[in-house]
Image (tube, rainbow, N blue to C red):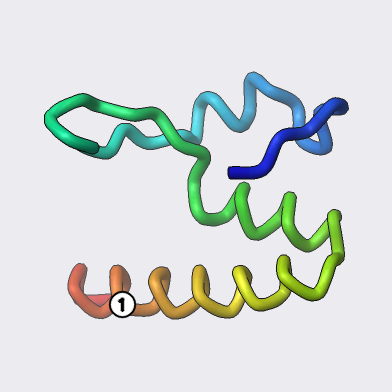
Amino acid sequence: MDVFVEHPIPFEEVWERSVIVPVGGTGVRIASIEDIVRMKTLAGRPKDFEDIAALERIRARKSELQGG
């Protein structure tokens, strides 16, 4: 989990693109992959770039499953 003290992306935009995923029987709202990648790119730490690579793989798998 990353916590920001400033909003690198306007909160309303992140909220609109967020998704709800099931976690232990409860719906948890998370930022979209696109917004997470954008925030991690702005942070620019080595770990963030590793995370971005993993997120890009997830995005590619989702696209394949959706036929795109």
Q: Is residue 26 above or below residue 30?
A: above
Q: Mark 1 belongs to which amino acid?
A: Arg
* Viewer-nearest residue: 17 or 46: 46
Image spot of residue 56 (x, y percent): 51, 75
Q: To which quarter of the image does residue 4 belong?
A: top right
Determine the residue positioned at 64% across, 20% down: 12
Determine the residue positioned at 41% across, 69% down: 59
Q: To which quarter of the image does residue 34 belong?
A: bottom right
Q: To which quarter of the image does residue 24 belong?
A: top left
The residue wearing badge 1 is: 61
Image spot of residue 31 (x, y percent): 52, 39
Quadrant location of the C terminus in the rendered image: bottom left
Whether residue 32 sits left or right of residue 66 in the image: it is right
| Number of other residues with Cα within 10 Å of mark 1, as a class: few under 14, some 14 to 19, many 20 or more | few
Determine the residue positioned at 84% across, 26% down: 5
Whether residue 1 sits left or right of residue 3 in the image: it is left
Q: Residue furthest left?
A: 25
Quadrant location of the N terminus in the rendered image: top right
Determine the residue positioned at 20% across, 25% down: 26
Q: Secondary structure at mark 1?
A: helix
Q: Is residue 4 above or below residue 33?
A: above
Whether residue 12 sits left or right of residue 25 in the image: it is right
Whether residue 18 sits left or right of residue 22 in the image: it is right
* Viewer-nearest residue: 51 or 20: 51
Q: Is residue 11 above or below residue 18?
A: above
